[in-house]
Amino acid sequence: MTKVRIGLVFTTLILTAGSTTRYTNKTTTRARLSLVRGISASKQNTTKNVTEKFINMSKRKAPSSDNNPNHDFCDFLTELANYERNVNRNIYKYNAYRKAASSLAAHKTRVTSGKDARKLEGVGEKVAEKIDEFLKTGHLKKLDKIRENGTSDSINLLTRVSGIGPVKAKELVDAGITTL
């Protein structure tokens, strides 16, 4: 039995010999699912490791550039993810870019090619091509086009305001409102 403290809530995890994990009913469903996903198959994680994995899986935390040799890849993938979510409204590409950025952030060594990146979970062929392009040229054509158009920057800025989603932000930008 392992007790994990998340904020002010204690969660008791009961680890069984099988592949199932049972837990008490004191946290939200999202927290429970994140905790269950964060526990390895061997079930030999310490409380600290489980808590760290829970914190690293948070959607609201950007991958940290501290001690991350792949932070430049994570930065451009996160920027592409935000563009796909807010401007193109393509949730599948958003999830793909976000997952690839998380995998690269968790990787402890520098990725030297797209082929190396393909070995990581969540990095597909298209993301590997973008990594190769970035390594060869130092920038991405797609990001350059996005940055030239001020619409995406305005939409990203406006969606940071509580109550304004991507659709409303696009309506505001089309109406001429581009800044706060």
Image (cartoon, grey):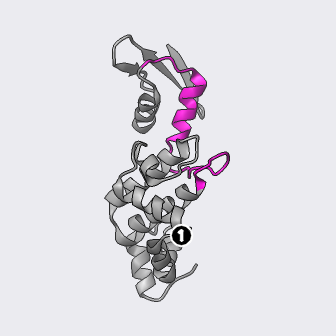
Residue at the limit of the structure toward the bottom, as seen here: 176
Residue at position x 38%, y 20% from top?
21
Residue 63 among those drawn in magenta? yes
On screen, residue 90 versus residue 11, left or right, reads left
Q: Quadrant of the C terminus?
A: bottom right
Residue 147: in magenta span:
no
Measured from the top left, where is residue 144 in percent x and y? 50, 76
Q: Give the residue at x 40% y 74%.
A: 168
Q: Nearer the viewer, residue 57 or 69?
A: 69
What type is the residue that disc 1 sits on?
His
Against 76, residue 4 (above or below) is: above
Report the residue at 44% width, 35% height from top: 34
Look at the image and give the residue range highlighted in magenta. Answer: 42-71
Do we see residue 64 in this rendering? yes
Number of labels in the image equals 1
Q: Residue at x 53, y 70 (%)?
A: 139
Q: Secondary structure at mark 1?
A: loop
The answer to whether residue 162 shows anywhere in this view is no
Q: Main secondary structure of the magenta part?
A: loop
x then y, percent, for residue 157: 54, 72
Above or below for 15 versus 28:
above
Kindly give the residue lying farthest to the right in the view shown.
66
Q: Position of residue 51 (x, y in %)?
A: 56, 30
Asked whether, in this view, residue 135 is left or right of residue 16, the answer is right
Q: Position of residue 83 (x, y in %)?
A: 44, 68
On screen, 22 above or below 152? above
Along the line of sight, the residue nearer the viewer: 96 or 27: 96
51 w.r.t. 80: above or below = above
Front one among 180 and 145: 145
Q: Which residue is mark 1?
A: 139
- Label 1 Cα neighbours within 10 Å, binned few <14 / some 14-19 / many ≥20: some
